[in-house]
Amino acid sequence: MSSIQIKTDVILIGAGVMSATLGALLKELAPEWEIKVFEKLASAGEESSNEWNNAGTGHAALCELNYTSVKSDGSIDIGKAISINEQFQLSRQFWAYLVNSNVIRNPQDFIMPLPHMSLVQGDENATFLKRRFKALSENPLFQGMEFSDDPEQLKQWVPLIMEGRTSNEPIAATKIESGTDVNFGALTRLLFEHLKSKNVEIHYKHSVKDIKRTSDGLWNVKVQDIESGTTEYHTAKFVFIGGGGGSLPLLQKTGIPESKHIGGFPVSGLFMACNNPDVVARHHAKVYGRAKIGAPPMSVPHLDTRYINNKKALLFGPFAGFSPKFLKTGSNLDLILSVKPDNILTMLAAGVKEMALTKYLIQQVMLSNEQRMEELREFIPNAKSEDWDIVVAGQRVQVIKDTAIGRGTLQFGTEVVTAADGSVAALLGASPGASTAVNVMLEVLGRCFPQQMKAWESKIKEMIPSYGVALTENPELFQRTHEATSQALGLSEKKTVFS
């Protein structure tokens, strides 16, 4: 076995949407930097970024009920929804910049306009939704949202959901036309094609085995060429670990203090895909319901129109489950091997705390196909089993860490872990993930390149006009950027009007 040693400026581990976004930003900000990418699979965007590994995408908090909570005084807290929508606006602006720069020629290959809806049943839920609608629609980011609890109106909005509904239980929905469907698998592939044209070296079928600090402060990355078996050693000043569920084991290998006392809890999933084109044609929206008691936030049921390979699709899910693998293509030993002396107490504490979640996941694993169909029929009363196929979703690894709340707290969200000197960064966690990739990667740049950020600021603002500005407090800027991005991304034929 031969070994080779090669120097570079930046190493990106994992060819998913996060590495693609960071690479694209760096090529604009520091075009002279040399970047290498290592991906163990045969092509880009094959794990969590892949369009078939997500039931729903394009998270802008327009319809996801778990981003708005009820406060102790009964009012609706919309802070998280505003934050996520602001972050999604940064993604839209960067994508529009890439289209205007001819980096992406056909935006419809990855983004399409699509109404976003929330749908609930029962008096209590309908009351919550109406109050949520009132709180959100007073904010400029959510203007244009409509509410209805009139069955006749709902038949116009979602005929497939209302047809055959026999229950007298109240049903209510909100709808906003400015939503989108985003194919992050397609976007990832487009970005890597661009990076390749900019002389970024992308090595597929290359597995990162170890990451060690060298005496001169660089990072030495041990890489195995899966096909030839050759081991290579690549050194870089900066390493980004964007390997989805596989990021935690690699972060642990760095040995940085920030990697201690962090664990991972893998959650697998299934969703259902409609195989009947007539049924697919009768639904046109992303429709999100409310999570069941004890269910993790990423298990909110939703019926999603999607565009995959430029063809309309209809997906329902997700059904959560448990697998010890950290990646869909991972090993059954992943969870066990991630337990280290420094995080064992954190992991055990989470295990004790999350008994309800564990029970829920086991129940989900045990569901029969007919039981899954019963859950689907809560959305589509007339759904037929033969019209729906089961699809295995991507693996998600939720972060477990010690927080102010206590030891072993399970985190639902996206987390960035960076070394104190900014020389290494890792992305952990799950939703909203890809939708907020641009904001997350700007956070990585801010933490890891604080000296350069001042020089880069004018270029960042050229690419992302609202960078550093709260759009919710600047409705005119929001209107301007929203109209400009809608035009660039082909999301509106007519001018969007905000009152």
Image (tube, rainbow, N blue to C red):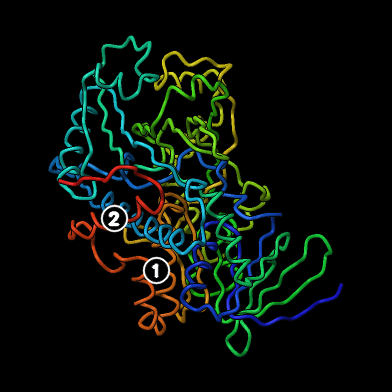
Q: Identify the residue at horizontal 38%, vertical 72% (top origin).
A: 460
- What residue would you read off at disc 1? 443
- Tell whether label 2 touches label 1 (CB within 8 Å): no
Q: Camera-side residue: 229 or 210?
A: 229
The one nearer the camera, 469 or 480, is: 480
Residue located beneath label 2 in the image = 83
Residue 332 position, x and y percent, is 67, 47
Give percent across and percent down for residue 399: 47, 55
Pick out the residue farthest to the right: 1
Q: Residues within 10 Å of mark 2 (few under 14, many from 20)?
A: some
Amino acid at pointer 1: Glu
* Three-letter code, disc 2: Ser
Distance from disc 1 to disc 2, alpha carbons, whole Å, reads 14 Å
> In the image, is residue 232 above or below residue 114?
below
The numbered disc on residue 241 is none
Foreground of the two, 270 or 450: 450
